[in-house]
Amino acid sequence: MLTALASQAGQLSEFLCSTIALVCNRLDSEVSPATSFLELRMDSLTFVSVLAQIEAVYDVEFQSNEMLDFLSADRVGELSRKISRVITDLQPR
């Protein structure tokens, strides 16, 4: 089960990096888990569009308090970890 969770987290991280690269008009190679949101100059509307894409692909619906927590992430990897925790908590056990 831990291997499946790690695999899902890795897939989410990859998806998040490529989605952010796309909406920020960057090459995939320019966005990694270590990339800072300040470096990307990502505005809040773009951020929300990324979250909407994650909701659609992963069939989840984030609550407003979760989205506020996501906004506190400084780097792509931190956001990925926060989202992964929420998605994992939503999955039936």
Image: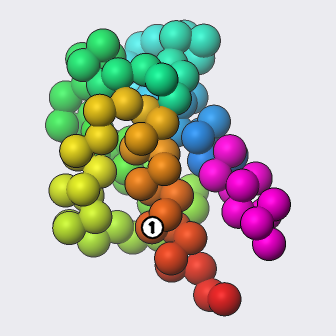
Q: Which amino acid type is marked by label 1?
A: Val
Task: Give the quadrant of the N terminus.
Answer: bottom right
Chain part drawn in magenta? 1-10
The image quarter in which residue 5 lies: bottom right
Q: Position of residue 19 (x, y in %)?
A: 50, 33
Name the residue at the bottom extreme: 93
Task: Give the quadrant of the C terminus.
Answer: bottom right
The image quarter in which residue 73 lies: top left
Is 92 left, or right, of 41 in this rendering? right
Secondary structure type for disc 1 = helix
Q: Classify 75 as above or below 30.
A: below
Is 55 left, or right, of 18 in this rendering? left
Is 69 left, or right, of 20 in this rendering? left
* Nearest to the observer: residue 4 or residue 16: 4
Q: Residue at x 57, y 62 (%)?
A: 58
Visible residue check, residue 59: no
Q: Residue at x 20, y 38 (%)?
A: 45
